[in-house]
Image (spheres, rainbow, N blue to C red):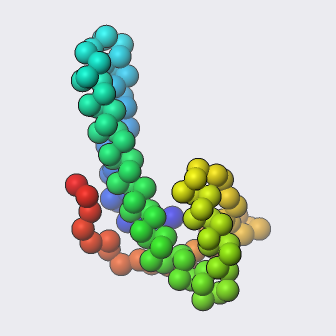
Amino acid sequence: MRAEAASVEFRLRSAQGHIEGVIRMVEEDRYCIEVLQQLAAVDGAIQRARREILESHLRGCVPEAMAAGRIDQAVDELVGAALGFSTRHHGADGAHRCHHQPASIAGGDE
């Protein structure tokens, strides 16, 4: 993955911190609404990371696949990712087939 790695990592670490907090809240038998609010924060952080990765893929990997005539593969991968299915997207050597260097993704939903 070559999405904005620092940004994606930040969002995932944020989600991780929220999850650790939620676990403590459950252990402490905290008020359900407070727990739900923290879970919403986890969902938000994960969705923003997912969006950045998807956007990077659409801007870099998909055009590469189209240029190489691998449109069906690109569609299958995206459908699988959207529906939660695992698809194989690595070559025989285990290397990721997408080798783009995306420009910084502007904007965001923070």
Identify the residue shown where x is 32% and y is 46%: 44
Tell me if residue 23 comes above or below residue 102 in the rendering: above
Residue 48, position as x, y percentages in the image? 35, 54
Residue 24, position as x, y percentages in the image? 33, 19
Give the residue at the far bottom of this rendering: 67
Whether residue 37 is visible here, answered yes or no, is yes
Tell me if residue 37 comes above or below residue 69 in the rendering: above
Residue 39, position as x, y percentages in the image? 34, 32
Give the residue at the far right of this rendering: 92
Q: Is residue 95 left or right of residue 32?
A: right
Of 67 and 104, which appears nearest the observer?
67
Identify the residue shown where x is 26% and y is 62%: 108
Residue 31, position as x, y percentages in the image? 25, 15
Identify the residue shown where x is 29% and y is 18%: 32
Identify the residue shown where x is 44% and y is 77%: 59
Q: Is residue 106 left or right of residue 73?
A: left
